[in-house]
């Protein structure tokens, strides 16, 4: 290995210290949920520790009481194009503690300061903090600033910033949100200018912790309404904190990434510390780490939704592999180093090792063929351009199309990064003005991003996160549907996912063959019998082992705590679930199954709607 790291504190120790500290403050530990949100179409992935807790932040009673802490695996798509510097990541681990209508700012801020300075031994003189400056939606957060001053943070290290910097959420289009107070570690670097401050991005200040004070619920109309209860949501990134504690200004040299980088060095026969290799190695390490976790959670590469993001991550890693002259299959080898490093904490990686290796290898082989197709297309375009014998005509045509717009088309159609297209054009002799090329590319990219945002807002509107009455009905209907499928098809059926909107439910389950029309009618009939009978929906809190003894279905066991909520619908259905649900089945009205399809080997999907 060509670099070493100072292992003053490793991730395993940080996770334990954090959870032990908050257990000592009366918190209960909940395990990490899957990266794929359950029953929430407002977002593709879990991007923060609070997302699995949305029902409880909105007022549902949590089976483990009002103080919760966890280490949650997260995936953030907003940072894909930023990965390549020293600190951005797509997959990350988030330490978090929550108050579900219990303690408030005084305790949250004081405990943050105590943990950082007394347990992690960070010099308080190195800490600066930010608070919300206030706007038309919420007032200036003088309360938080006052608490920081009492703890000894001087006025000159307390900054008031706008919503862009000091407001968190919602995770999707709607949901819980509120002002936050962030903590930054001063690395000792010189200020980048007179306006240098925490959050400016120059590298002087590292964000180390964030306390979010969730007082509001953002509605679909864009209004900020007060929640029934005040919640505290905090987050501390494991990757960045480990770097800070070990005096590193590069996350990719900390002990979480070191073995992955070492594997890339071995495959490529190149050194990470050579400046030209840092960006491609960082992209490969980050993206294949994220891809391994996604596949372990049941995502496969595709052209839609989560599968599209997975495909994008894998292909971006492969493209950057070309910068290291990696022309043979390498993604599975890198994934194996991820599995070896992380499976002690996340055993699903080891359990799904074969699937991870197979999916990465298949996608890599497929994309290598696509690269060849892209290069062929590019050469054809260049030949068409070269048919013009008049030099002036060529000069006039090369900038608008054979510049940035072609770069974007290559990115969109073949997955080529724009710099790869530019380099290839220069390699084959096309004269291009770099400045005009990048301007043209950015213009087309920005238009595409604007369309994508509008489409996403429409696509992911609604969902369980807003607790709409119709979505709650559909949620209870999934329990009835699950039970009915098991009665008709057999007990080998179990739920592997669901997606709810105000218009329909989508239910994914295990089954090896197509469900016949007659079987679907039987399932639909059983569900509607329970609805017509207006059966009460009863909730009980109990130990997970006791729930199993009573016959409750619990197929997402890795995300449950020791105590769980069990929802019982007569003698028909009993499931472990977070809720919310209707009080009785008669509230649902009649349902209709309108589609059934395959979604992978041994996996089926049903769509149903309320008539």
Image (spheres, rainbow, N blue to C red):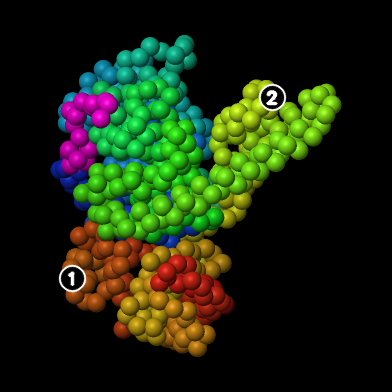
In three-dimensional space, the C-alpha distance between marks 1 and 2, rounded to whole angstroms, equals 72 Å
Secondary structure under badge 1? helix
Above/below status of 357 relative to 158: below
Q: Position of residue 46 (x, y in %)?
A: 40, 50
Q: Decide: few, some or many residues near mark 1? Use Cα within 10 Å; few <14, some 14-19, many ≥20.
A: few
State which tag comes first along the sequence, 1 or 2: 2
Picture disc at residue 477: none
Q: Quadrant of residue 243?
A: top left
- In this figure, what is the number of numbered marks? 2
Q: Which residues are magenta?
A: 1-17
Task: Out of 420 and 160, give the one closest to the viewer.
Answer: 420
Residue 312: within the magenta? no
Q: Is residue 146 left or right of residue 328?
A: left
The residue depicted at 21 percent of the width and 49 percent of the height is 344
Circle 2 residue: 431
Choose top left, top right, bottom left or bottom right for residue 94: top left
> Mark number for residue 546?
1
């Amino acid at each position: 290995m060509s670099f070493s790291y100072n292992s003053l504190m490793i991730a395993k120790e940080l996770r334990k210290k954090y959870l032990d500290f908050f257990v000592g403050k009366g918190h209960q530990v909940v395990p990490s949920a899957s990266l794929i949100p359950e029953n929430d179409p407002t977002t593709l992935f879990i991007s923060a520790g609070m997302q699995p807790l949305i029902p409880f932040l909105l007022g549902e009673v949590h089976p483990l009481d009002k103080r919760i802490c966890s280490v949650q695996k997260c995936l953030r798509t907003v940072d894909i194009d930023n990965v390549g510097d020293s600190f951005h990541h797509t997959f990350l681990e988030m330490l978090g503690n929550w108050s579900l209508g219990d303690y408030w700012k005084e305790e949250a801020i004081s405990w943050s300061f105590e943990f950082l300075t007394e347990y992690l031994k960070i010099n308080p003189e190195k800490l600066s903090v930010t608070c919300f400056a206030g706007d038309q939606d919420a007032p200036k957060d003088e309360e938080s600033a006052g608490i920081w001053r009492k703890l000894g943070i001087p006025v000159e290290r307390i900054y008031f910033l706008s919503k862009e910097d000091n407001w968190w959420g919602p995770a999707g289009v709607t949901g819980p949100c509120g002002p936050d107070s962030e903590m930054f570690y001063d690395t000792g670097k010189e200020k980048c200018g007179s306006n240098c401050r925490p959050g400016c991005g120059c590298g002087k200040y590292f964000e180390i912790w964030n306390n979010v004070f969730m007082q509001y619920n953002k509605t679909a109309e864009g209004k900020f309404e007060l929640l029934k209860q005040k919640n505290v949501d905090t987050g501390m990134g494991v990757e960045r904190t480990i770097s800070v504690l070990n005096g590193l200004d590069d996350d990719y040299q900390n002990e979480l990434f070191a073995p992955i980088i070492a594997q890339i060095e071995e495959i490529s026969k190149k050194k990470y510390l050579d400046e030209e290799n840092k960006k491609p190695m960082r992209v490969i390490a980050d993206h294949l780490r994220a891809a391994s976790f996604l596949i372990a959670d049941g995502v496969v590469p595709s052209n839609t939704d989560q599968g599209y993001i997975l495909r994008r991550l894998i292909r971006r890693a492969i493209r950057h592999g070309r910068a290291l002259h990696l022309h043979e299959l390498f993604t599975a080898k890198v994934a194996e180093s991820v599995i070896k490093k992380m499976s002690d904490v996340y055993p699903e990686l080891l359990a799904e090792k074969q699937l991870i290796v197979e999916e990465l290898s298949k996608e890599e082989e497929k994309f290598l063929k696509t690269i060849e197709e892209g290069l062929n297309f590019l050469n054809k375009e260049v030949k068409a351009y070269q048919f013009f014998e008049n030099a002036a005509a060529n000069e006039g045509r090369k900038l608008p199309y054979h510049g940035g717009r072609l770069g974007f088309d290559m990115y969109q159609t073949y997955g080529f990064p724009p710099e790869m297209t530019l380099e290839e054009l220069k390699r084959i002799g096309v004269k291009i003005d770099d400045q005009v090329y990048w301007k043209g590319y950015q213009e087309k990219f920005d238009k595409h991003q604007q369309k994508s945002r509008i489409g996403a807002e429409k696509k992911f509107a609604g969902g369980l996160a807003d607790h709409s009455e119709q979505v709650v009905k559909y949620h209870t209907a999934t329990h009835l549907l699950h039970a009915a499928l098991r009665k008709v098809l057999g007990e080998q059926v179990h739920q592997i996912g669901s997606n709810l909107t105000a218009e329909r439910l989508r239910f994914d389950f295990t089954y090896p063959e197509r469900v016949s029309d007659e079987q679907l009618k039987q399932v639909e009939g059983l569900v509607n019998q329970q609805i017509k009978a207006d059966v009460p929906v009863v909730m009980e809190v109990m130990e997970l082992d006791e729930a199993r003894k009573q016959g409750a279905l619990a197929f997402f066991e890795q995300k449950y705590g020791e105590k769980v909520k069990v929802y019982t619908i007569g003698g028909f259905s009993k499931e472990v679930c977070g809720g919310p649900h209707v009080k009785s089945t008669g509230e649902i009205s009649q349902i209709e199954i309108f589609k059934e399809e395959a979604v992978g080997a041994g996996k089926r999907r049903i769509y149903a709607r309320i008539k």
